[in-house]
Amino acid sequence: MTTQVIVLNGGSSSGKSGIVRCLQAVLRDPWLALGVDSLIDAMPGSMQTSAAGTEFTADGGVNVGPQFRTLEAAWMAGVAAMVRAGARVIVDDVFLGGAASQQRWQQALAGLDVLWVGVRCQSSVAAGREIARGDRVPGMAALQAAAVHHDVTYDIEVDTTHTESLVCAHTIAAHIS
């Protein structure tokens, strides 16, 4: 089969977005980039600060509620529908629930050829990037650096601690069939 979907999972500020842009540049065919941040941005502002949607704790934790999960499931089904209609898609996500998050994607993408990619980054480096970005809750990167990978199974892993996005993209592209 030919790879139809690339799912990148990594913590906040791990370098996923940079890798996605590089993948779009180095892959032969056009690939759409869809990220969980876009899903969150598409939700009403009230859902970004409520127990039903998403809540950010003072230490950088993220709690997601039932309305978020409902919209997330619809979004995942929509991504899968685009792939089934012929688009190739790179998903940029943060598996806050570790293996449970991957299972939700596996269900949505059932029957499709998916490349599962873990994007790792040393927590102190991700925390430094988080500070430099200035658009994240402090502590989020450090909390997520390892937790998002808990019991998740990958086809390939890359580490952006000391490796540039373009090098990671070429490593991933070598696994695209």
Image (cartoon, rainbow, N blue to C red):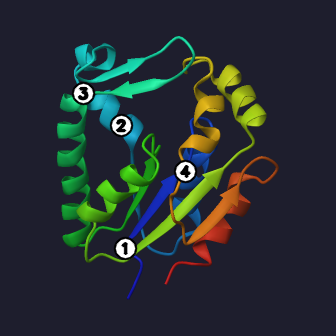
Q: Residue at x 24, y 32 (%)?
A: 68
Residue 71 in the image: above or below residue 129:
below
Asked whether the beta carbons under mark 4 and mark 2 sit within 8 Å of each other, the answer is: no
Q: Amino acid under label 2?
A: Ser
- Residue 112, horizontal then vertical, whole percent: 30, 75
* 71 sits to left or right of 112: left
Question: CA gap, disc 1 to disc 3?
Answer: 27 Å
Asked whether the beta carbons under mark 1 and mark 2 sit within 8 Å of each other, the answer is: no
The residue wearing badge 3 is 43
The residue wearing badge 4 is 150
Question: CA gap, disc 4 to disc 1?
Answer: 25 Å
Q: Amino acid under label 4?
A: His
Asked whether the beta carbons under mark 4 and mark 3 sit within 8 Å of each other, the answer is: no
In the image, which disc is placed on residue 38?
2
- Residue 38, horizontal then vertical, whole percent: 36, 37
Residue 70 in the image: above or below residue 62:
below
State the SS at label 1: loop
* 57 sits to left or right of 63: right
Q: Amino acid under label 3?
A: Met
In the image, which disc is placed on residue 4?
1
Front residue of this view, candidates 150 and 8: 150
State the SS at label 4: loop
Q: Amino acid under label 1?
A: Gln
State the SS at label 2: helix
